[in-house]
Amino acid sequence: DIQLTQSPSSLSASVGDRVSITCRASQSISNFLNWYQQKPGKAPKLLIYTTSSLQSGVPSRFSGDKSGTDFTLTISSLQPEDFATYYCQQSYNTPLTFGGGTKVEIK
Amino acid sequence: EVQLVESGGGLVQPGGSLRLSCAASGLTFSSYWMNWVRQAPGKGLEWVANIKQDGSEKNYVDSVKGRFTISRDNAKNSLYLQMNSLRAEDTAVYFCAKERLGIDAFDIWGQGTMVTVSS
């Protein structure tokens, strides 16, 4: 099974900060990496698919990139509504797997 | 509006069974792979199973193989998860989720239904 390791597990940031979250895959997954945002008590929301494609309706301050087996979600200017938990997920093969999550909190 | 609505969750004793349902509306249900994803209280997301458009192909996470069965009824725009031999570690919110066409990313989610396995 493909393991996804997210870092950090949590971070504190201020509104307007640039924030980056990393997801490392245990093997090559090509570009088959997706990112989700989840707020407490709610279902996850797809932000980015296949590494860097922005899901419809998602603000352009969210972006994704990769370097080898390291994938990055970047929020260019953190907004109040962005405080949430973020998960990466690989869609390279089954079992589909998620990273452990990164909680973004208000500083 | 595209919508997925889960039902069927509840409290069940260890070793018991439960059948979850997911009703889809506002989309051509038969065109998409469909998935179940779960989240234990205070924990992360875990993919459980998926099923091809015509039901001919199904995949499961190892921890539920032989105990859970995913199925669908395209005429009723519905997805199901039959859960047998339930264990305490199956306690979670269960979400149904639609694939983004051609990619195993989940672009539409239901609100989730809670399954609690406890004596």
Image (cartoon, rainbow, N blue to C red):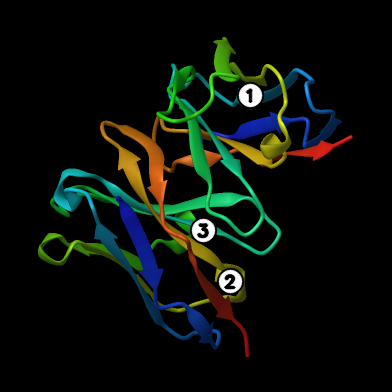
At horizontal 45% and vertical 41% (from top left) the residue drawn is A96
At horizontal 68% and vertical 42% (from top left) the residue drawn is A85
Q: Quadrant of residue A103?
A: top right
Q: Residue furthest left?
A: B75
Local crowd size for mark 2, using a 10 Å CA cut-off: few (<14), some (14–19), many (≥20):
many
Is B54 situated above or below A98? below
Q: Quadrant of residue A84?
A: top right
Q: Secondary structure at mark 3?
A: strand
Instruction: Look at the image and tell me in which quarter the C terminus of chain B lies.
Output: bottom right
At horizontal 82% and vertical 33% (from top left) the residue drawn is A11
Q: CA distance from mark 3 to mark 1?
A: 22 Å
Q: Secondary structure at mark 1?
A: strand
- Nearest the viewer among A16 and A85 is A16
At horizontal 51% and vertical 58% (from top left) the residue drawn is B38
Question: Residue A21, position in %: x, y?
Answer: 70, 25
The residue at which mark 2 appears reads as: B91
Question: Residue A8, position in %: x, y?
Answer: 78, 30
The residue at which mark 1 appears reads as: A24
The residue at which mark 3 appears reads as: B38
Assess whether mark 1 and mark 3 are in contact (beta carbons under 8 angstroms). Answer: no
- Amino acid marked by disc 3: Arg
- Nearest the viewer among B68 and A83 is A83
